[in-house]
Each structure stands twice: as C-alpha cells, then as structure tokens.
Amino acid sequence: MSIIIENLSHIYMEGGPFEFEALDGINLRIEDGEFVGLIGHTGSGKSTLIQHLNGLLKPTSGSVEVDGIKIEAKSKNLRELRRRVGLVFQYPEHQLFEETIYKDIAFGPKNLGYSEKEIEKRVIEAMGLVGLDYEELKSRSPFGLSGGQRRRVAIAGVLAMKPKTLILDEPTAGLDPKGRDEILGQVADLHKKNNLTTILVSHSMEDIARLVDRIIVLNKGKIALDGTPSQVFAHSREIEAMGLAIPGISSLMGDLREAGMDVPEDIFTVEAATDAILKALRGNLDA
C-alpha cells in the first residue's frame, strides 16, 4: 500500500490576512510495511501532513496517492480511503463517547454497514490486538478505565476498521512511563504481527530511535532529513538547531567527538555507544 506524495503544499486561510503555508512542496514515498517515524518541532507541519493521508485535509496544490486512491484539491468521495488508513489522533480517548467499550469500538464498523456478526467479530479481534480482555471489559464504561487503557480502546476502534496503514499522532502524550511503554510496545507488536504500514508521530527521539526503521524530519513545512535512524541522528547538531532534543546517547557521542574521541556519528543506543567508546579507548591505549 504505497503512499506517494508529489509537490504537496497546504495553505491555511489562503488569501486572508492570516494566511499560513504549513506544507511547502513535499515529495515523499512510503512503501508497504514500512515503520516510519515522523518528527518535527511544533508547527513543523506533522499533523497537517498526516491529515492529508486519509483525506481529512486536501492539498492546496500537488497530490497524495494512497494504494491507488488519489487525493487532490477537488477529491470528494474518500470513504474507501478511510477504510484503508486508520488515524489515531493525539489524546484519542477524548473522542470516546459511547456508554460501553463494545459500542465505542463498534462505532466505525457499524457506520460502514457491516452485519452485527461481523461487527462483533471485529470488536473481539481489535480488543485482542491491543491486549484488552473482551469478556471482562466489553460491557464496562470506557470512562472507568486508566488513561493507558482508554487509549487502547481508542486504538482498537481504529483497528476494528481493519486499516492497511496505521497513523498515530503522539500516542503516548500525557501518559506515565508505564503507560507509555505499554502503548509503544503494543504499537510495535501491531506493526510486526499485522504487516501494517505504520507512521508514528512523536516528539520523543528516544521512542522513535528504538522503534522505527525510517525517520522523516519536518522543519518549517519541508522535509529536512529522511533516512534510517543511524543516518538521521548522524546530523545531531542540525536536529538540535531545529529545536528538537536528540537522544541523550547521540548528544553524548557528539560531545565526545568534539572533545577529540574517535567515535562514530551514527550512535543512538546505549549498547552501541558502550562498544564504540571501549573501542576508541583501546585504540588510544594501543597508539
């Protein structure tokens, strides 16, 4: 389910006194099954970009094509696209509104006209995918759950639509460390087990670094960097200049290089840093 973006620009309030260009000539291709991290400072265009991927926003110019469905300024019927692309907004639990967990998760499939039998099957599957016990929780109110559990219910509501692409906008925002680790672990499992194309939007470089295969950095509506975590974090000083906090290990390695230690640029895990530092120290002793 390739995503092809060509010369995408989006202008809010075009022609008005508060006109603002949020995206400026974005060209991007995301292949089936990729796990992509999308990062950028507040106002960089991240949320604007992902909302184009299921047609919530339409291009001011340029085009977006998802699995052969083209989204342009004049596109109208995008229902099929929204079956294929699931978008989980930041604080998705704020969108829970039904009296039971079952009804909340069933809302999307029901509106697509599926039979009660198919809806029940999808709810059971979706709850299983996010680690929620169907029999125990189906009749409970979502508002009696913990923050992490409510977020799982919201994600299950998207998964019940059986999307091929899953987009998550800051899925751990506001959660405690335990809840954050649980949600990220669930996202990683979902990606792996269901062969999804997954796009994770986050401010946390630590989370992005250990989960995704590819990182796209947005800055002022343009793609500033695009590559593997190693390739992107090799540009640590550029990333910091954009107002982003790089992983602590990357920052440490940058400081060591500036101090004269011969260590690589593309280090962002503790294990790799330990090996690199030991190797550099041994090299100094042998010299």
Image: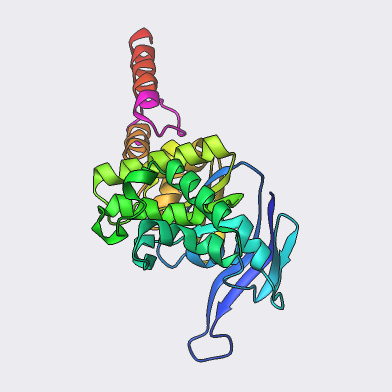
Main secondary structure along the magenta-highlighted residues: loop
Which residue is situated farthest in the right direction here?
Answer: 68
129 is higher (above) or lower (below) than 259: below
For residue 272: magenta? yes
Q: Which quarter of the figure has residue 153?
A: bottom left
Q: Position of residue 286 (x, y in %)?
A: 37, 8
Nearer to the camera, 6 or 219 = 6
Q: Position of residue 138 (x, y in %)?
A: 37, 52
Q: Residue 167: tell me if it is visible.
A: no
11 is higher (above) or lower (below) than 238: below
Horizontal arrangement in the rendering, residue 174 relative to residue 44 (left or right)? left
For residue 203: magenta? no
Q: Residue at x 58, y 72 (%)?
A: 57
Nearer to the camera, 183 or 10 = 183
Q: Which quarter of the figure has residue 42?
A: bottom left
Q: Position of residue 110 (x, y in %)?
A: 54, 63
Horizontal arrangement in the rendering, residue 208 relative to residue 86 (left or right)? left
Q: Residue 67: tell me if it is visible.
A: yes
Nearer to the camera, 260 or 133 = 133
Which residue is situated farthest in the top direction here?
Answer: 286
* Colour basis: rainbow
The mark tally for this picture is: 0
Quarter in which the C terminus is drawn: top left
Q: Position of residue 178 (x, y in %)?
A: 25, 42
Residue stretch rendered in magenta on the structure: 258-273
66 is higher (above) or lower (below) than 215: below
Q: Residue at x 41, y 26 (%)?
A: 263
Nearer to the camera, 176 or 159 = 159
